[in-house]
Image (cartoon, rainbow, N blue to C red):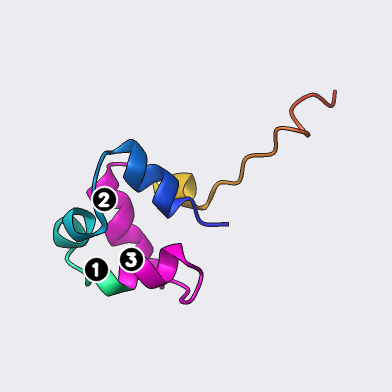
Amino acid sequence: MLRLKEMRLKAKLSQQELAKRAGIGQSTIHYIETGRKSPTYKVLEKLATALDVSVADLLEERHSSLSSIS
């Protein structure tokens, strides 16, 4: 699951602000965040750069239930 919205909110950015930083349309961010569109790798790279995170950070899923397994 893509963590775009979580990362955007953590950076205190609106969809419009992130779109401007990433050089993509605000509607693209909306569609990605709502699951109506899957981003290309190029778009993921632009978003990661704009958020100052790695593409892997955007794609990372949190598995809290697995962290307690030894």
Identify the image quadrant of residue 20.
bottom left
Is the Cβ of the residue at disc 3 closer than 8 Å to that at disc 1?
A: yes
Q: Which residue is mark 3?
A: 29
Magenta residue check for 59: no
Above or below — where is 38 with respect to 70? below
Most foreground residue, 22 or 17: 17
Q: Which residue is mark 2?
A: 49
Q: What is the secondary structure assignment of the residue under circle 3?
A: helix
Magenta residue check for 47: yes
Residue 60 position in % (x across, y down): 55, 46
Give the residue type at disc 2: Thr
Residue 53 position in % (x across, y down): 35, 42
Q: Residue furthest bottom?
A: 37
Q: Please state the extent of the stretch shown in magenta in the rendering.
A: 28-53
53 lies left or right of 16: right
Image point (28%, 73%), residue name = 27
Residue 58 position in % (x across, y down): 45, 50
Task: Give the prevailing secondary structure in the magenta stretch.
Answer: helix
Q: Residues within 10 Å of mark 2 (few under 14, many from 20)?
A: some
Is the Cβ of the residue at disc 1 closer than 8 Å to that at disc 2?
A: no
Q: Residues within 10 Å of mark 1 (few under 14, many from 20)?
A: some
Image point (34%, 43%), residue name = 9
Q: Nearer the viewer, mark 1 or mark 2?
A: 1
Q: Which residue is mark 1?
A: 26
- In space, the residues marked 3 and 1 are separated at their CA atoms by 5 Å
Give the residue type at disc 1: Gln
Q: Earlier in the sequence, mark 1 or mark 2?
A: 1
Most foreground residue, 17 or 63: 17
Q: What is the secondary structure assignment of the residue under circle 1?
A: helix
Report whether residue 47 is seen: yes
**Quadrant location, the C terminus:** top right
